[in-house]
Image (spheres, rainbow, N blue to C red):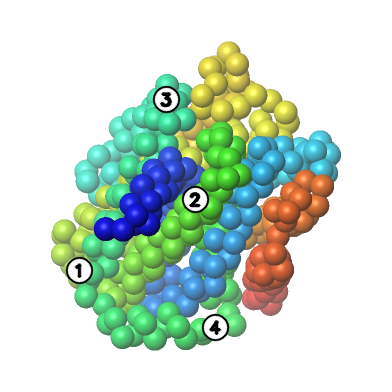
Amino acid sequence: MNSSDAVKKPSSWKSLLIFLSVMGPGIITANVDNDAGGIATYSVAGAHFGYSLLWIFIPMTVALIVIQEMCSRMGVVTGKGLADLIREKFGVKVTFYAMLVLIFSNLTNTISEFSGIAASCEIFGISKYVSVPMAAIFVWWVVVKGTYKSVEKVFLGACLFYLAYVITGFRVEPSWGEVLKETITPSFHFNKAFILMVMGVVGTTIAPWMQFYQQSSVVEKGISVKDYKYARLDVIIGGVLVSIIAMFIMISCAATLFKSGIRIESAKDAALALEPLAGRYCSKLFAFGLLNASVFAAMILPLATAYSVCEGLGWENGVDKRFKDAPQFYFLFTALIIIGAGFIMFPNINLIMVMLLSQAANSVFLPFVLVFMLLLINDKRLMGEHRNSRFFNIVSWATVVVTVSLTLGLTITMFLG
């Protein structure tokens, strides 16, 4: 061993330790994408359209990484959350209306998470009148009684259980040649169902709340500019992992349900339909993945909303704050959980359309959030040398154009019947 090797090894260990200390916001934010609404969307996409939508994940992964990296970079450089910066740059009135839209969007998503909890537990024989209140209490207790570090550990632990979908994907034995072909060969159909499905996939892969939560969690974690390269790696890993999991959900349903001509309307339908086709083990594994994802997202979405609204309106916020120091933060977080869980307790509630439309609503709101972000991150006085490169601006503006085009396309096809 020469002297240069002796110098490199401690440096590598130090880099690993720094990355582990910085890791969290990117991986957690990305993985919540695969929530109850997301799993339902990917399941329906696979069951109804087979492998034909897999190609979307290549450009979507690039777009997701670029967009979340911008949030992370703004958080590190400015030390402020996205809602905070929007208020300072565009005024209180614009921020207020943006927060109203975000609350509505996240409330429908929170309802869908508790719907996912109810649906998955029913597969295991547990009534929603038992599972939903218990989950709501658990979600509230973890966040309110924890610190940022302890809550983050719980979130990172939940990310590991997404491997259930990877295992399911391999057990259903898909045609990997066909999977590869559809992944690298784009295809598009100009009809309402296909466009709505594409909008749903886009909406659940890059959701508006993600940008707010990503930046807020980076700020609360206190990541410095000199350690930013590790935060960027955290974002990249998160973006790649979430797309792989989503693809395996779609592959599992395409290889079984689409192949057998079985139509579904929810993730619960997918889990139940898998049993006669792929076995009880796969069915229960799929249902467990849905339960884990739903509980995980039921924690993050109200938390992300509370962060964003309190930042935007200038109120104290943060998991490390006590209730008396940040009453609005904890009140909003608690209210969203109560409303989200309470909605599910009504009998005969059909939330399939709520779940799918919540994903489409994300596609409608996303362009406005991205425009705010792009104006902020290209502000020389705000970001200095850390402004966007030309590549990042091209990818971001392209994402805005695509999402607006999909929204207009869906509207036109619906109008034409």
Q: Which residue is the site of mark 1?
A: 171
**Residue 134, image x, y percentages:** 33, 30
> Callout 4, which amino acid?
Phe
- The mark that comes first in sequence, 3 or 1, is 3
N-terminal of the pair, mark 3 or mark 4, is: 3
- Spatial distance from mark 3 to mark 1, Cα to Cα? 38 Å
Which mark lies nearer to you, 4 or 1?
Answer: 1
Percent x, y for residue 207? 57, 54
From the viewer's side, name the closer residue of 126 and 30: 30
Q: Label 1 near label 3: C-beta < 8 Å?
A: no
Residue kind at label 1, given as amino acid type: Arg
Q: Amino acid at mark 2?
A: Tyr
* Amino acid type for the residue under numbered disc 3: Gly
Which comes before the other along the chain, label 4 or label 1? 1
- Spatial CA distance of label 2 from label 3 is 25 Å
Which comes sooner in the sequence, label 1 or label 2?
1
Residue 335 in the image: x percent, y percent? 55, 28
List the residue tagged with mark 2. 230
Q: CA distance from mark 3 to mark 4?
A: 46 Å
Spatial distance from mark 4 to mark 2, Cα to Cα?
37 Å
**What kind of element bears circle 3?**
loop
Mark closest to the chain's N terminus, 2 or 3? 3
Location of mark 3 (residue): 146
Whether residue 116 appears in this view of the structure is no
